Image (cartoon, grey):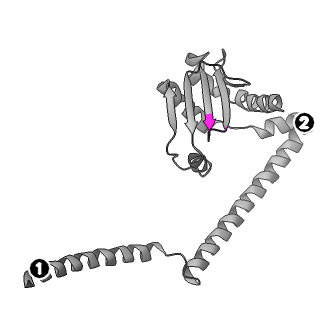
Amino acid sequence: MKKKINQFFNHILSQNDWMVQDLFQYSGKRITLKFADKITFNLIVNDQGLLSLIEEGSDHTDLTISIPKESIQDIILKQDPKNIEISGDVKLAKIFNECVKKINWNIGLDLSEIIGEEAAGLVMQVSKSLFKEIKYKVKNTLETTIEYYQEENKLLAKNYQVDKFNKEVDSLSIEFEQLKRKFKGLK
């Protein structure tokens, strides 16, 4: 099973041959990715300048990136992750990060080899439409839910309400300080 997963990831990585120009100078370097201290991936920049997933690590690694579970959620939500630990070659880490952001799986190419170009094109077209519609429906549902909890249920505050509340708290703090000064003056 693990061998099949490695083959799948290496297949995807091999489709991204544009990264050769960035990684070729790091040929032979090993990268270890640790997710929540439970899942570890070992990669190597192969002699062609491509990333390859290798089955087992070695005692030697040129770059180790440890990602805590809180940061995994940030990565999935496409936010800036926090608390990632990087040790080793920082230049390689920067280039690796840029490469990982751009990795793309050409599903259409793989499908065309299985079912033919025309059928793959049709499947891709239908898939794009379907995902676009799903994305629209999910977004619409979330917006409606948020609006319900802001307007009807008053469970969530709107931005202007939070701003107004913060200004009122600031105003009360200033007035309280003024009252304390007056009280001290009366003694």
Which residue corresponds to mark 2?
114
Which residue sits at x=79%, y=52%?
A: 127
The answer to which quarter of the image holds residue 7 is top right
Q: Is residue 45 above or below residue 171?
A: above
Query: Disc number at residue 184?
Result: 1
Quarter of the picture containing the N terminus is top right
Based on the picture, tell me whether residue 185 belongs to the magenta stretch. Answer: no
Residue 95 in picture, x, y percent from top left:
53, 29
Based on the picture, tell me whether residue 36 belongs to the magenta stretch. Answer: yes
Residue 148 in picture, x, y percent from top left:
61, 79
Which residue sits at x=91%, y=39%?
A: 115
Badge 2 marks a residue whose secondary structure is helix
* Mark 1 or mark 2, earlier in chain: 2
Residue 9 in picture, x, y percent from top left:
74, 32
Which residue sits at x=77%, y=29%?
A: 6
Quarter of the picture containing the C terminus is bottom left
State the separation of the CA atoms marked 1 and 2: 85 Å
Camera-nearest residue between 176 and 90: 176
Majority secondary structure of magenta residues: loop
Residue 72 in picture, x, y percent from top left:
60, 46
Query: Disc number at residue 35?
Result: none
Instruction: Give, as a three-letter code, the residue at label 1.
Output: Lys
How dense is the environment of label 2, judged by Cα within 10 Å: few (below 14), some, or many (20 and up)? Answer: few
The answer to which quarter of the image holds residue 164 is bottom left
* Magenta segment boundaries in residue numbering: 34-38
